[in-house]
Amino acid sequence: MNTKKKDIRSLTKEQLRDFFVKNGDKAFRGNQVYEWLWNKSLHTFEDMTNISLETRTMLKENFVINHIEVDSMQRSKDGTIKNGIRLHDGLIVESVLIPTEKRTTACVSSQVGCSLDCRFCATSRLKRMRNLNPDEIYDQVVAIDKQSQLYHNHRLTNIVFMGMGEPLMNYNNVIKSIDKITSSEGLGMSSKRITVSTSGVPKIIKKMADDQVKFNLAVSLHSAIDKVRTSIMPFNETFPLHDLAESLIYWYEKTQRHVTYEYVVWDGINDKKEDIKALINFCKHIPCKVNLIEYNPIDDGEFQQASSRAIDNYISNLEMHDIVVNVRRSRGKDIDAACGQLANKS
């Protein structure tokens, strides 16, 4: 990588237009290049066929396009695809295509490693190397969209920020990537089909509400008892449940949109009556639904999936209190592509 050259995708369309005017060309040339970079997702200047060879040479002399490469691809027996994504500086993240009968979902990463320390998650054992740039997040979506068309004969339908990293610890770049993904000049996807999942950073949840974001919000909750949650998600000591609840109430007041709580039930950890009661009380703060997620072990056996009886107790009690609850079966377990398993084993 040539560090002297700027990544052209870090420029806005206006900055690209200014560049061409300063170099004696027409401003609309910037529009053409911008379309090649984003709407057409080109990775080389050579392929910008409506631009003169001389102009393409000038772009190569001044800029680089730091695009991603799909370094490895594994296909699960259930159709899930896990990609090892090589970034321009050689670092690797993982992204996943999750197919169902009616849709395909891209699960994308927002950081190399993770800022947080959830004890049940393989990604949290990797130190956070850096945040992903907006174009690196965007490129993951483009790559999975191509795979969706190739293997499932239709465009990508949904995006979840549930891969490696805590999205709200890379908030600005995540927002910029979503702006590009939803723009008519980018991929033109609806914000309603995008979900950002967070372990719960109250200050940023309030900022999202103030920013009037249009995507969906999911919170990895896993316990509504501070002591239990801190034991499995130590950062809860810094961002306790009271602060999280306050930020979610603020979110709902500002956006009028419900939240999804992601919740894994583990044997002997959060499978008791008091755990269920605490979750029901937490759900009373704002309109919400609960996704009970199947746990995917990460080798050491410390965390084990709770019994089906414990799961049924959660379901019956939540439904008794008119709380919408779904059970989510994990996909891609045989290739370590399921929730909590992304750890760059390769």
Image: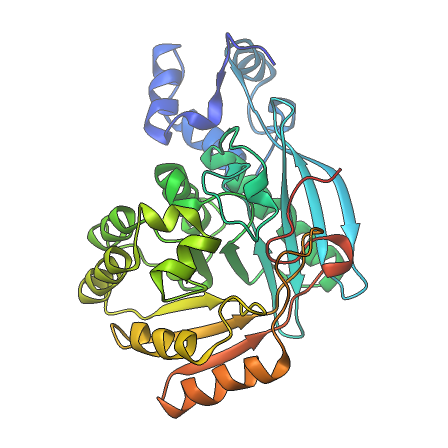
> The N terminus is located in which quarter?
top right
At x 50%, y 7%, the residue is 4
Confirm whether residue 191 shows in the render: no
At x 36%, y 53%, the residue is 200
Give percent across and percent down for residue 246: 21, 60
> The C terminus is located in which quarter?
top right
Give percent across and percent down for residue 256: 23, 69
Q: In the rendered view, how is the structure colored?
A: rainbow
Q: Residue furthest bottom?
A: 320
Q: Is residue 157 above or below residue 102?
A: above
Of 10 and 164, which appears nearest the observer?
A: 164
Of 152 and 29, which appears nearest the observer?
A: 152
Give percent across and percent down for residue 60: 57, 14
Give percent across and percent down for residue 62: 50, 11
At x 72%, y 63%, the residue is 152
Of 62 and 82, which appears nearest the observer?
A: 82
